Image (spheres, helix red, strand yellow):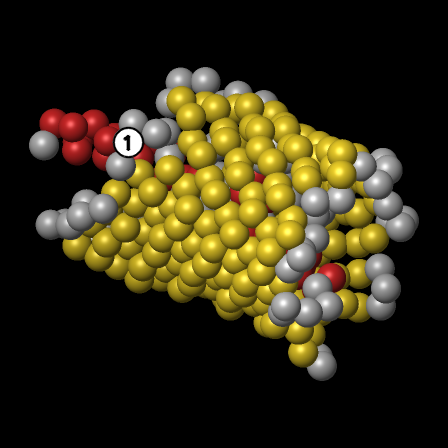
């Protein structure tokens, strides 16, 4: 019981960020993603899925701070259509048999000409604390990306734009944030990415990282965040339509978190 209480306290410290961690392919690049594109955009700035030309699916699993029972799991998919792209994200964060924070999001993303991409996402949240109660809530996200040049992309993302929250019978926070980001393809081997994030109750954070591709099927990634200093590292392996990504984040006090992602593009 003492161990569970200690873990729960640790969880409360980090719960504000529970549903804002990008998938491993973006997390390793300094936890950025506002101006990056592809299926992983469903976990950061959903407007990035508008760049997809075919359907894609992905699943992730993250072990938070290795010596705890905190888990993060997600599954997401994107399907292009004649009038835009539909995306679906389902994720679960919490401690087994103690605390579960479930989120399901439905996204509509669309290209407006060759340069502009926009998205709107509706989210359903369900929070359950064993022996204390449960609550449900809804929120909405908005995202936009603009292609400044062939190699330079910029983005903006707002999460929980109405700053909605759970009912008073259960304590819980639905994160609200505003993020500005940019990414630049320096060469066929190197891409850099940077975000500035403002989150209620947490303040401003600056994040950045890079991806290095020495050969076509292998990526190495790394990055840093300034507020609550973290270091990020990871790699990706591409084989035909399959992609496997790994990311690790080192918190200055809480230790190591590691995440694995598998994706498939049709």
State the image coordinates of residue 155 (x, y, percent, origin top left): 72, 49
Residue 163 visible in the snapshot: no
Residue 129 visible in the snapshot: yes
Quarter of the picture holding the N terminus: top left
Residue located at (41% from left, 41% from top): 62
162 or 262, which lies in front? Answer: 262
From what the image shows, is residue 235 above or below residue 147? above
103 or 211, which lies in front? Answer: 211
- Residue highlighted by disc 1: 68
Residue located at (39% from left, 50% from top): 73
The answer to which quarter of the image holds residue 26 is: top right
Q: Number of marks in the image?
A: 1
Residue located at (37% from left, 35% from top): 64
Residue located at (53% from left, 39% from top): 246
From what the image shows, is residue 176 above or below residue 52? above
- As drawn, which residue projects farthest toward the right? 149
């Amino acid at each position: 019981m003492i161990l569970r209480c200690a873990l729960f306290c640790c969880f409360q410290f980090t719960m504000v960020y529970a549903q804002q961690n990008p998938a491993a392919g973006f997390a390793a690049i300094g936890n950025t993603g506002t101006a990056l594109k592809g299926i992983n955009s469903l976990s950061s700035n959903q407007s990035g899925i508008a760049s997809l030309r075919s359907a894609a699916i992905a699943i992730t699993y993250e072990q938070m701070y290795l010596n705890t029972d905190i888990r993060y799991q997600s599954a997401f998919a994107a399907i292009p259509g004649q009038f835009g792209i539909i995306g679906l994200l389902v994720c679960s964060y919490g401690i087994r048999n103690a605390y579960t924070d479930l989120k399901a999001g439905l996204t509509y993303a669309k290209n407006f000409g060759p340069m502009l991409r926009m998205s709107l996402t509706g989210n359903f949240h369900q929070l359950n604390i064993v022996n204390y109660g449960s609550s449900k809530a809804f929120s909405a996200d908005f995202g936009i990306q603009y292609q400044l040049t062939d190699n330079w992309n910029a983005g903006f993302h707002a999460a929980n734009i109405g700053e909605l929250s759970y009912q008073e019978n259960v304590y819980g926070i639905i994160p609200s944030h505003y993020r500005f980001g940019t990414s630049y393809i320096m060469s066929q081997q190197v891409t850099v990415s940077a975000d500035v994030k403002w989150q209620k109750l947490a303040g401003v954070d600056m994040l950045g990282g890079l991806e290095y591709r020495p050969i076509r099927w292998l990526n190495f990634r790394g990055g840093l965040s300034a507020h609550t200093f973290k270091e990020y590292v990871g790699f990706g392996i591409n084989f035909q339509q399959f992609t496997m990504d790994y990311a690790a984040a080192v918190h200055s006090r809480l230790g190591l978190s590691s995440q694995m992602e598998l994706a498939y593009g049709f």
